[in-house]
Each structure stands twice: as C-alpha cells, then as structure tokens.
Amino acid sequence: MTPSDPGSAGIDLATGDRAERRRRIHPAWWVAAVAFLALLGAAGFRGAPGALMLPLHEEFGWSTSIMSLAVGINLVLYGLVAPFAAALMDRFGMRLVVSTALLLVALGAGGSILMTESWQLLVFWGVLIGTGTGAMALVFAATIANRWFVRRRGLVMGILTAGAATGQLIILPPVAALAEGIGWRPASLVIAGTALAAVPLVWLVIRDHPEERGVLPYGADPETYVPPAPAVGGAVRRALDGLAVAARTKAFWALAIAFAICGATTNGLVGIHFIPSAHDHGMAATTAAGLLAVVGIFDIAGTIASGWLTDKFDPRKLLVAYYAFRGVGLLLLPWLLSDQVHPSMILFVVIYGLDWVATVPPTVALCREIFGDRGTIVFGWVFASHQIGAAVAAFTAGVVRDVSGTYTWAWWGGAALCAIAAALSILTRRGAALLGPRAARPGRSDAVAAGRVDDGERIRDM
C-alpha cells in the first residue's frame, strides 16, 4: 500500500505526507460514530416496552406481573448474551452480528403488533428484543474501542457508553407520545422501522479491524504495532473458554462482584425503587420521575468525563472514588427524601447522575489490561454480573420494603455494598501488576504489554 491509496487516509504506513494525514479524519472516528448511533438505538429499544405497558394492560387486561416478567427476561438476556456476542464478533465480525441483532429487534417490535396471548409477549419483548439489544450491549462498545483505538480508548468508551445511556432519553418520549396518541401498534412499528433503518448504515461503515480500511488503529505506532491474530474456534467455546480462564483469577472475581454491585446500586435500587421510596415520603410520582430524568442527563456528562479520566489516571483509583461517592449518597438518601424537592436532593441527583455508569470505562480498561486479547469477552461476563446484580437488588429491595415498611435498610445495604466494591477495586491491582509491563520479568515486558502471553503463562503469573 502506498500513501496515495484511498484507504490509507488517517495514518501514514510508510513515508506519506503528514499534512495530508492531519487534514483527514481517521476512519476510526466514523466507525465510532455509527457504533454510537447503534448503541443509542439499542438502549431505546430495550427500554421502550416500559412505555407500552399501560396500553397493553388496557387492551388485553394482562397483569403487571406478566409484563414485568417479559421485561425481566429482556434484562437478563441483555446481560447474558453479551459474552457470547463478543465471541461471535471475534469469529464472524461486528457487521454481521450487529446487523443480525438489529433485525431481531425489528422482528420483536414489529411482530408484537400481532400478539393475542400473553406468552407471545415473553417471546417478542423478552427473548427477541432482549437478545437483539444484548448483542449490541457494552461489549460492542468495548470491541470498537479496543480494536480501533490505541489513543483515546477511555474517552471513546465513555462516549459510546453515554450513547447507551442517552437512548432512552431520546427514544422513549416519542414512543410514549405515539402510544398515547394513536396506539401502541404504531409505536411498535416505529421501533421496528428505526432498527431496520440502522442496518445499512452499520453494514456500510462498520469494519472489524482498521487494516480493512488500510489504516492502523488511531494512535498506534507504526514501528511497534502488531495486528491481532484472527479468532479461531466456535463462538460459544470461545466465550466459555474466556470465562474458564478468567474465573481462575482473583482479579476477575473482584471485577465481577464489584460490577454486580454497580448494577445493584443503579438499575436495581435507584432505577426501580427511587420513585416508590420518594412517594413513601410524600413526593409526587411525576416529580420523582423527573428527578430520575435529571440523573440520566448528568449520567451522559459523567460517563464521557470518566472515559477521559481513564486515559489519564489509574482506573482502580477511579473505581474506588466512584463507589465511595455512591455509597455516601445512598447512606444519606433516607434523610434527603421528603415531600418537596430541596437543594440537598438536587445535589444528590447531580452527583449520582455523574456517577451512574462512570464505572464502565475504567472497568473495560482493567479487563483489557489484565486479560489482553480476551479482555472484551471477559468484560462480557463482567457485564452479565452487572445485570444479575441489578435483578437481585430489585427483588431484595422490594422484600425489604414489604417486611419493614420502609426502604431505609435497602439504601443502607446499598451503601455497605459500595464499600465492598471500593475494596474489591483495590484488589484488582495485584493481578494487573503482575501482567503489566512495569512488573513483568526481564525480556517479557513487550509481549505482556501487547497481550501476547499465552493463557497458561498468564494463569501461572496470577
């Protein structure tokens, strides 16, 4: 390849013109932009059923329990599909996996207009939309960041994570308005049409590796960069092998348990139970819902900032700070709740919003640092623990409310869990240090830093 080749825009593989390179946008940024749109849509698709529950109840008389079961299946699959999706992306490519995922979402949303029985809700909302959005979960973002970027990885991961958080803010309001104005079926068709419209964009822009565009990853050094070896073996086996390798390390369990606590203290506790807890204190449900919307807005800024910080600072220290701030907020929450919105509650909402999924970029960075080429698959399993933690916390907090008549012990239990997560984040240092270039044995630093040490040697080091 010569510098004049069209595919070489973005980086000079030989002796090309540096000025020309600076004038052109690296293809990695276009790939990241389309990934952002796909993640934004996936988050909106996953949350859209919540806006359709009331119309379905009014038309079919289905209970809240059966509709909640469908949403529960959706959430669990959203987490459990992630590691297998990461392996499928390694084996068959991101374009095929993400395009298929969008088609599943379209089938689930579009097919739901034909529903007549409640079990069909479990299939369309739970299985199809849960599987489709799970295949476009944060493992997709991690794959893009790890393959296409050397510099700005943390920032890109923060932006893509923010896209996943922003989806509900953008897609849910029009879906809810359509469902209320002209019916839930047109709203479902809008979701299906949006998913289908994204397929050609993904197919045209997304590529699995920078080499397919004739460039190196953004920020890679042409003198030292070594392209990753192509994936071999079945996707299911790769996903399970990744779990088997990771599960033999203390670092994996520290990350997985801490991220489960992250899910418990965000989606599980605050996301599900903040509104009823505020209502217990006399606050109107609409007011409490508005406060949660503010959490979502500040979550965008917090996640992007966390990505930038991950590029600058030790991700372990960031996780300790994030979990500590979250724990303090939950500890104080019972005294902050009242029938009116006051400045201290606004401060809680802002801080909790900035901290909501700020844990994602440093967690992805640690998975990559510790597990090398398997890092994305391992993060898929860590992300699955996040969803399991959310489900357990959502159920447990409800039991606490029923037994004690208050959510206070649930909030304090979440604060205690955050202290545990902060401690576990520190424990990941030992495994990472042994795999990092500074602590590597003589003659191995380059191979370790590049993630090319074989799995047996990694485990012996751990």
Image (cartoon, rainbow, N blue to C red):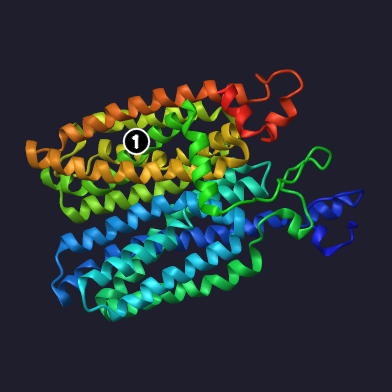
Instruction: Tell me where residue 81 sits by quadrant.
Output: bottom left
Q: Residue at x 23, y 69 (%)?
A: 119
Q: Position of residue 272 (x, y in %)?
A: 24, 49
In the depicted view, which residue is nearer to us: 369 or 355?
A: 369
Residue that carries the numbered disc 1 in the rendered image: 261
In the image: residue 424, left or right of residue 461: left
| Apparent side of residue 18 relative to residue 137 in the rendered image (left or right) | right
Horizontal side of 379 relative to 69 (left or right) equals right
**Does residue 140 appear anywhere in the picture?**
no
Residue at x-position 32% and y-position 66%: 125
Residue 342, x across and y down, in percent: 23, 40
In the rendered image, which quarter contains the N terminus? bottom right
Q: Nearer the viewer, residue 113 or 358?
A: 113
| 407 horizontally vs 269: left or right | left
Relative vertical location of residue 202 with respect to residue 396 in this rendering, above or below: below
Residue 134 occupies quadrant? bottom left
- Residue 278 position, x and y percent, is 17, 45
User: In the displayed structure, would residue 359 be above or below residue 391?
Assistant: above
- Tag 1: amino acid: Ile
Residue at x 15% of width, y 69% of height: 62
- The quadrant in which the C terminus is found is top right
Label 1, secondary structure: give it. helix
* Residue 458 screen position, x and y as percent: 60, 28
Compared with 108, 428 (above or below) is: above
Residue at x-position 82% and y-position 57%:
8
Instruction: Let me know if residue 28 appears in the view.
Output: yes
Within-10-Å neighbours for mark 1: few <14, some 14–19, many 20+: many
